[in-house]
């Protein structure tokens, strides 16, 4: 069946440069940033956006997320020009959430104030750990004092909403070290915490030369201790690795998990769009130089329409990451498919205690959340 109306719309902006490539990072990030590239890249981003506007005429944005890479390498003036350009092209409601990622090593007081003045109203600060030895092993350019300073600068600049990005299960990390990280992060938190386990991904230095990570029992102890601390601090887990105070969830990330649409601009950016009654995905070329060359004469991105089985699987891949799940009716309104498409597998999961027995909700149980990858895998095409 065709979709009657499109879902909420967000915008993702990718800035692909970093001061240094971390050994665990498999994101599209590149060293060698030169501030002279700012005006050229901002112009390319807006040209990229122009090429996608025909898909979304009249649809307002609910959120903007500027990620990377390290977007805070860009000046507040450049970020202001970007957001001004977006506002000239799309409808931005007064309460729109505008998030920018920032690394402590790139944080400066004047820039944080400038980002706030430019329209950024939420930061995601990439702390990862407050331990100097662990930061060194992770290849980070900042130290403990810089991380603390960055959070304090965000507070002084007037950011009432910010996320602290923290990892656990790090090389040689003990339960005590992980707890100490969390205690400090929770004492300084701005309503939202991302806390997730380090995983070794292909095409990274750590994949080629793996570090010694905590064993399974130690990881379980870290997880249990951390979740207890976070709950005691009044933050609620609403997604696999996201915790927040009430109403402080990341609206942009919620849009992903609820299978909303998002335009995507920048080198390697990939998006999802519902248009003409069908859902499709698209991606821009990853290499910054190739991207800049392509944006001299931008073409509308080539889209790949999602066939029914993949469409259903992608919906469940996202929806089941939310601890509260999603209304069952959203499966049809966001995919155009009947619930019959997944009902047999849902019934199996319910019978095995992996999904909640509620026809109105698609939601994993606590047991299902513990084995979430296995549950999600049941809905993905072979």
Image: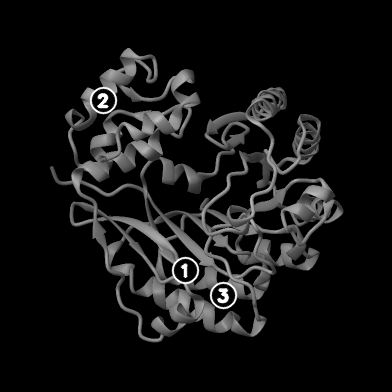
Q: Which mark is residue 81?
A: 3
C-alpha gap between disc 1 and disc 3: 9 Å
Query: Between residues 113 and 316, which one lies in front from this camera angle?
Result: 316
Q: Residue furthest front?
A: 209
In the rendered image, the vertical position of residue 33 relative to residue 234, given as above or below? below
Find disc 2 in the rendering and name its residue: 345
- Secondary structure under tag 1 reads helix
Q: State the SS at label 3.
A: helix
Along the line of sight, the residue nearer the viewer: 312 or 272: 312
Q: Is residue 223 above or below residue 110?
A: above
Q: Residue furthest right?
A: 145
Q: Which residue is mark 1?
A: 86
Say which of marks 2 and 1 sits in front: 2
In this image, 34 relative to 270: left or right? right
Q: x%, y% of residue 165? A: 66, 46
Query: Given this view, does label 3 or label 2 mark the residue nearer the observer?
Result: 2
- Ranked by sequence position, the earlier of labels 2 and 1 is 1
């Amino acid at each position: 069946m065709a979709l009657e109306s499109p879902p909420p719309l967000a915008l993702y902006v990718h800035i692909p440069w970093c001061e240094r490539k971390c050994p665990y990072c498999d994101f599209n990030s590149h060293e060698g940033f030169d501030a002279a590239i700012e005006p050229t890249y901002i112009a390319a981003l807006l040209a990229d956006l122009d090429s996608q506007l025909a898909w979304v005429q009249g649809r307002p944005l609910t959120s903007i997320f500027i990620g990377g890479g390290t977007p805070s390498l860009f000046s507040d003036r450049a970020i202001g020009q970007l957001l001004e350009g977006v506002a000239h092209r799309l409808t931005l409601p007064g309460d729109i959430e505008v998030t920018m990622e920032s690394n402590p090593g790139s944080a400066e007081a004047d820039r944080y104030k400038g980002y706030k003045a430019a329209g950024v109203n939420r930061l995601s600060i990439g702390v990862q750990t407050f331990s100097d030895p662990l930061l060194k092993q992770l290849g980070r350019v900042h130290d403990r004092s810089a991380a603390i300073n960055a959070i304090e600068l965000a507070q002084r600049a007037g950011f009432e909403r910010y996320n602290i990005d923290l990892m656990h299960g790090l090389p040689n990390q003990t339960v005590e070290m992980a707890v100490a990280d969390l205690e400090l992060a929770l004492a300084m938190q701005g309503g939202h915490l991302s806390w997730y386990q380090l995983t070794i991904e292909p095409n990274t230095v750590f994949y080629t030369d793996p570090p010694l990570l905590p064993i399974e029992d130690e990881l379980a102890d870290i997880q249990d201790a951390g979740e207890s601390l976070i709950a005691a601090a009044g933050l609620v887990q609403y997604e696999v690795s996201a915790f927040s105070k009430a109403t402080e969830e990341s609206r942009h990330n919620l849009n992903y998990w609820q299978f909303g649409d998002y335009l995507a601009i920048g080198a390697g950016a990939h998006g999802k769009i519902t248009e003409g009654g069908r859902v499709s995905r698209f991606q821009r070329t990853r290499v910054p130089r190739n991207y800049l060359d392509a944006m001299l004469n931008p073409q509308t991105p080539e889209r790949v329409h999602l066939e029914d089985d993949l469409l259903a699987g992608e919906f469940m891949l996202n929806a089941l990451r939310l601890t509260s799940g999603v209304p069952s009716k959203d499966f049809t309104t966001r995919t155009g498919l009947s619930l019959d498409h997944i009902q047999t597998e849902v019934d199996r999961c319910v019978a095995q205690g992996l999904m909640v027995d509620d026809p109105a909700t698609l939601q994993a149980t606590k047991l299902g959340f513990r084995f979430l990858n296995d549950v999600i895998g049941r809905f993905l095409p072979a």
